[in-house]
Image (tube, rainbow, N blue to C red):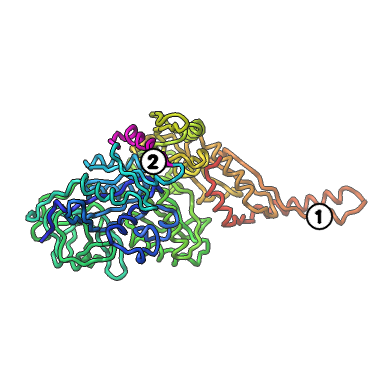
Amino acid sequence: MSKALNLIRNFSIIAHIDHGKSTLADRLIQRTGGLTEREMTRGQVLDNMEIEQERGITIKAQTVRLKWKAADGETYELNLMDTPGHVDFAYEVSRSLAACEGALLVVDAAQGVEAQTLANVYQSIEHDHEIVPVINKIDLPAAEPEKVREEIEEIIGLDASDAVMASAKSGIGIDEVLQAIVDKIPPPKGDPAAPLKAMLVDSWYDPYLGVVVLVRVMDGVLKKGAQIKFMQAGTTHLVDRVGCHTPKIEQLDELGPGEIGFITAQIKEISEARVGDTITDAKKPAAQALPGFKEVQPVVFCGLFPTDAADFEKLRDSLYKLRLNDASFSFEMETSAALGFGFRCGFLGLLHLEIIQERLTREYDLDLITTAPSVVYKIALSKSKTEDAKTIELHNPADMPDPNRIVTIDEPWIEATIYVPDEYLGAVLKLCQDRRGIQKNLTYVGHGSSTRAQVTYELPLNEVVFDFYDRLKSLSKGYASFDYHQIGTREGDLVKMSILVNEEPVDALSMIVHRGNAETRGRGMVERLKELIPRHMFKIPIQAAIGGKVIARETLSALRKDVTAKCYGGDATRKRKLLEKQKKGKAKMREYGSVSIPQEAFIAALRMGDES
């Protein structure tokens, strides 16, 4: 039979990147005997991707069931969910939080409250969670726990008077954290006799078991051998395995109300097991699905092309394999005159793009060219002779329709929250103004030398997807923290800027820009290409154009052979004749010659696409 609900605690850990969330999870696992010191062959046990360990970030939500004998002598079952901290995975975080009753808020004693901490705490408060503040890294020389305690109260509005002081690395305060979980986080509610209702929290692909589904049972009992139905997807499956991670895999007969565990049901495609779906009994279904489900939509698009055209098949296979584990990533084939065959890929955000790109390079040994990232534009078209008026979504600047038919172009906007030390505020405000930002709020946090500004800006996503984050970090020497959420679309005066090399458009370099910034952006691009393209035997014009109007131009001079070297003395007409002959040859060459742009030039031009 299912366990007594009052002995179960479901909680997640929320924190900004690098505040010690995964290390704290390690210590809790070790302290409760989930793994012995010998079995913990590496730190951050729950981060099992090489990229997660290297960068110190969590990409996939992980769960682990721990047993802890509390001060009252009872043994409690603690279900810990280690959630991603980055904004790109905000929906996954929201589902993980919906599966819990409380959260540990981990704040670095040296860094204080940062942007992502704030975003995730507000999500946690919306789910009506009991939040236990934990001030981590108190043994660092720069630690100021009292100041951080004040910050938590001042910025978030949580009572931090009894915040747990801990150092996950040194193992200080771990017992106090476990006791606080038992004392402060409420037990789950649920009726074992009601029809089965469980939330699909996450899913991943296992080459031996198929899709493994992480679930939180709300009502009813989920048993091995049961026929289940996914309410949003409308598919039915037979459960062949029920279990939990301790963090070793442990098989169970059933999961009762309030419990978190995993099931397998011979599901082949991860797209069938969508995060946030409701699982119910196929024979005796629940009346309605759990609230909060939404389709995950890609936000940023870019083209991925193999440097060597022979790698195209390899790239396609690699993308299919990656998609097995990541349903939020989408791709379709595209061709480019300059780069050949490749794929147009959709991502949840820039970090997601970077991770996929890095995994393709590392795990599948591919050499890739990435075109400039772009966002999804909504374009309203007027009626034409052959078509009615309609609205289309544009993912690729190269597919921009005829400008004469465009009525309006709407672009996505975001609301960004930036925390920055006072001395870098001027540079950050200028960066946001240059990117067409609208300032909404500016407040100060803290006292004396450690004053920080909290700035809220509305910005077009188009201006953020290039190198906004890198520029923000370099302007603030790495101290600024940044978090955002989308706030819908707005109409913008946007145009397609084409780059022409020797009067031939290069589709991979075309981009959609705001009319006001087009000239600066175009001039920066042509100047850079002039340095990157090697000289040929003829003059090459490099132009940036909007429609038929050239807005910036640079000319790459020709390589010249000194044809007059053999003339010594004699009449000047001989030299002129030879030079005229050379001139005619160069003109002919330019007419028929094709300009080869090396791959490195593309990569460099696209990578630095926004530093002007």
Residue 257, horizontal then vertical, whole percent = 14, 55
Q: Is residue 320 magenta?
A: no
Amino acid residing under circle 1: Val
Residue at 52%, 61% in the rendered image: 307
Label 2 sits on a secondary structure element that is strand
Depth order, front residue of 531/216: 216
Label 1 sits on a secondary structure element that is loop
Q: Quadrant of residue 65?
A: bottom left
- Residue 310 shows up from this direction: yes
In which quadrant is the C terminus drawn?
top right
Is residue 104 toward the left or the right of residue 477 in the image?
Answer: left
Amino acid residing under circle 2: Asp
Residue 255, horizontal then vertical, whole percent = 16, 60
Q: Is residue 378 above or below residue 590?
A: above
**Foreground disc of the pair 1, 2:** 2
Residue at 28%, 53% in the rendered image: 81
Q: Is residue 209 above or below residue 43?
A: below
Which mark, residue 563? 1
Which residue position is annotated with label 2?
483
Residue at 32%, 64% in the rendered image: 36
In which quadrant is the N terminus drawn?
bottom left
- Residue 293 shows up from this direction: no
Q: Is residue 246 above or below residue 497?
A: below
**Span of residues in magenta:** 143-160
Depth order, front residue of 32/105: 32
Depth order, front residue of 533/149: 149
First along the sequence among labels 1 and 2: 2
Packing grade of label 1 (10 A; few <14, some 14-19, many >=20) is few
